[in-house]
Image (spheres, rainbow, N blue to C red):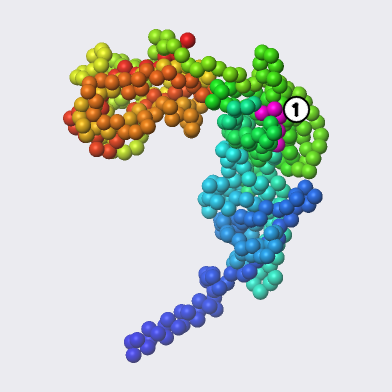
Amino acid sequence: MKQLIIMLIGISLLSCHRKMSPWPYDGDKQSVTIQTRTGNSGSFATLPLNCQLFVYNEATGQTEKHDVTQEGSKNRYQVKLYPGTYTGYCVTNASEEIYWKYAETDMPENILLKSQQQGGSRDHLLGSCSMTVQEGEANTFTFDLERKVAQLLIVINNFPEGVEDLQIKVNNIPKTISLAGTYDSGTHTVTTSASPAVDGISTTQLLVFPPQSGKRSTLTLVSNACAYISDEYQINDIAANKITRIDITFQDLPEMDIAYFSTSVETWDKDTIKEEWETPGPQPFEPCQGTGDGNNLVDNPGFEEGIEEELPLWWKLDAGGKDKKISVVTENTYNGTYAALLQGATYLYQDIPVEGGKCYQLKMHVSAPNPEVKWRYWCSWMEGSTALSGFSDPIRSSSYQYQTEGYIDAMEGMIVRAPANATRIRMEIRTYSGTPLSGDGLYIDEISVERVR
């Protein structure tokens, strides 16, 4: 009898739920068709093949990201939504999470599509549409899309032979654009590699968000292998759905190479304006030779200047991990009264200002009395606070190092040329798991960076 009463109560509750519908369930969702188009179809040879949908629910004040299914045509998609009133936002070529910065509680103006610094952006088009989804209706909505990126078409003529690492850097590019179509006031630099030359001509396409509020972008050519940085070339016009074509011609002259620049601004289909500019081109250089000039650029190189917040003055320790320890000790020194002792798994570093393209002599004296110590030097060329990946291998240990017989100069007084756009060198020494947390660890003393004149 008791079980029968419980069953009747359950049936009664279920009946009330379906009659009153106090909350939605998946069966309430309606099929919605999304069509995309452009206001000026002549500007778009083909529409991008994917659509990322965000839907702002006016009743809940929340924005949700939805995956849509392509429906045969490249500009027609399907999604299921509950009945209600929404504002939808469609963005092309931005399905991956790496492109977005948002929370579901954010308003559309705070949901941000991010500009990519390496290699530039994709062909992003954006459109919005008011959507009232009704039960049992043919819910079809059309989004008019507008292109939100500009194209830089960079054509380099008479491409210098032997230059394989030429980078194109463009600054003052907005970091984000919101679903509401507002570009970020903050900017960064976008970098791409120049395409390989064919018959002496390199053609590179770079998609970027256009600069805002009257800001101008500048273009710089950089070759670290040639220790070359061009002068900055100001680009006077970058606009969404426009192509800014920049023609660069390296001219062979008796005493130097000159790069001549000209610009034309076009619709996504073509033509207009030109201006000329020139800058010295890449120059051959002699290998670094000689020795350091005796002026050590490292602050507190021998750890003689005291401790602040448990660290040697001017030096930093990695922020992560617990099994690590640094001490300033008086035993086992290379020179002077003090040395630094690293224990556990950690790394110690200091960033030292350098001048791009110049030669430097590097030294780092270390002692590892204990055979369990595992270490290596791991230095990096930096542009500001960003490591220049791909250029630091010559100043890094190729393998782990272990016990030493007394002090050694781990870097053997190597002489290296700073990459053209380097502003700092990070002198860094690392210890790894297995290095004792008590007793002997890795002793470090007399680190130096000297300019070779």
Pick the front one: 252 or 386: 252
Quarter assignment of residue 322: top left
Residue 328 visible, this angle: no
Q: Secondary structure at mark 1?
A: strand
Q: Is residue 78 above or below residue 191?
A: below
Give the amino acid at mark 1.
Ser
Q: Is residue 109 above or below residue 212?
A: below
Quarter assignment of residue 352: top left
Quarter assignment of residue 197: top right
Q: Position of residue 43 (x, y in %)?
A: 77, 47
Q: Residue furthest bottom?
A: 1
Q: Is residue 134 above or below residue 202?
A: below
Residue beneath the point at 19% across and 19% down = 331
Q: Position of residue 340 (x, y in %)?
A: 27, 23
Q: Position of residue 283 (x, y in %)?
A: 60, 19
Q: Which residues are magenta?
A: 153-159
In the image: residue 332, left or right of residue 21:
left
Q: Is residue 143 above or below residue 314?
A: below
Residue beneath the point at 22% across and 23% down = 405
Pick the front one: 19 or 141: 141
Residue 168 visible, this angle: yes
Q: Main secondary structure of the magenta part?
A: strand
Q: Which residue is mark 1?
A: 262
